Amino acid sequence: MRILLFIFAAVAALNSSSLKDTTMDKPRLKKFFLPEVDQYIDWWKITDQNFDQRVLESVDPWIIVIAPEHQIPVAWKEYATRYRGQFWFGKFFNKWGENLEERFGYEGKPKVLVYSWTREAKKKGPFITDNFSVALEKAIESLPVTSLQRLSFDTTIEDPSNIDAFLTNALYGEEKNPKWPVIFLLGKEDEEEGLPPITRVISHYFSDSFKFAFVKFDQLKALKKVFPDYYPTDMKDEFPDTFIVAGKEPSDDAPEDEFELTFSVVRMSKQKFGMSTKFNDVAAFFFWVNEQIRETLPGRDPNEDMDKKTMGSIRNKLWKRLEIIKPAVMKAQKESDVMQAAKRFENLNAAASKLLEEKEKEAERLKNELEETQAKLEEAEGKIAESEDSNSTEDPADAKADVEQKDEL
């Protein structure tokens, strides 16, 4: 089978008829049973008692400041808000730990510990510095990039980085397991500093249902040739710019030897979804797109279960990373949300069953009405046929008498 990827003039938003939500209301995490923003604390309390559980058992990087109580520099505090949900920040006041000088070289002034990505890396111990900017660089460098690839526009489809190859592999690389293609457009500063942490973290936690690639800013012209209407005139300041490619398969009457895919772009606009540098905004955007147009995802198994359809594995990962930090609280919250989700699905199924039952009853009523009408029609046709037969078998003598009577007149 020959696969032809015809990428038509992609639009910045799908046709409104394809969407259930056409408002400008920002999607809420709670709607998708995800941890809400207030669950992502900027500065977690670290003590000798919770250190192993919170820090060493976590996959995510940690930046921990050891300092006298309430003496963390204000400039350092602001970074936690900026990188909320991408990795964790901890405050370890000296009164909450013992032998800090022996363990971490702490001598009364703020000290920064960096525990890198993965539990295995954390076993090697922390990177220790007095410079918070260096600590940030170290934490970001440790974030994974294995789920990200750079796109090319001047290679053949045999090259996995080719735009057509990327879209094909995303949708048809795994049988009955298509993934939404996601493209990050990096800013000029990103090219100098490397891949932004938001792209690294998101591409890791959402890899079950999404396939990720990035385009450098100097490739914008090539990107616009593929998606002519992708980039709006209001050039924005925040990068990366994030969009999902929504595909559409051909109709059933398309030639068997050709398989044409057409695409449109669903862009993460700031007005609707928030900032593309904020973990929770991006998460809500991805779940919103999946909810809105899941039915159109090429290669999707029409019989997929509810967990697959609603990206349950990703939801569980997002809860799990928080459960490690505060197990009891998050477990209770998750169980509550799961119960709500189960109740919601139960109500939806009940409503669907009721609607189906009503439709079946209506169909049965129409069937009976049709049968009655058909019977009456057949009865009427029978009477007409009998009348015609009666006329055709009239006595010839009577007919002759009628003619003679007419002649006399």
Image (cartoon, helix red, strand yellow):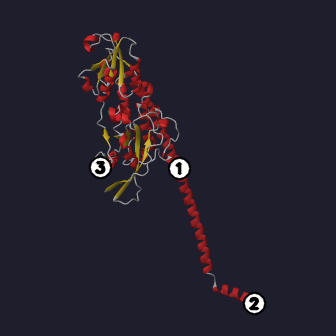
Residue mark closest to the camera, 2 vs 1? 1
Label disc, if present, on residue 361 of the rendered structure: 1
Count how many numbered circles sit on residues in the image.
3
x and y, in percent, of residue 47 in the image: 33, 15
Which secondary structure lies at badge 2?
A: helix
**Height in image: 249 above or below 110?**
below
**Height in image: 133 above or below 300?**
above
Q: Which residue is mark 2?
A: 408
Q: Residue furthest left?
A: 124
**Height in image: 275 above or below 255?**
above
Q: Which amino acid, mark 2? A: Glu
Q: Residues within 10 Å of mark 2 (few under 14, many from 20)?
A: few
Q: CA distance from mark 3 to mark 1?
A: 58 Å
Q: Which residue is mark 3?
A: 155
Q: Which amino acid, mark 3? A: Thr
- Residue at left offset 54%, top offset 60%: 371
Which secondary structure lies at badge 1?
A: helix
Asked if residue 338 shows in the view, the reply is no
Q: Which amino acid, mark 1? A: Lys
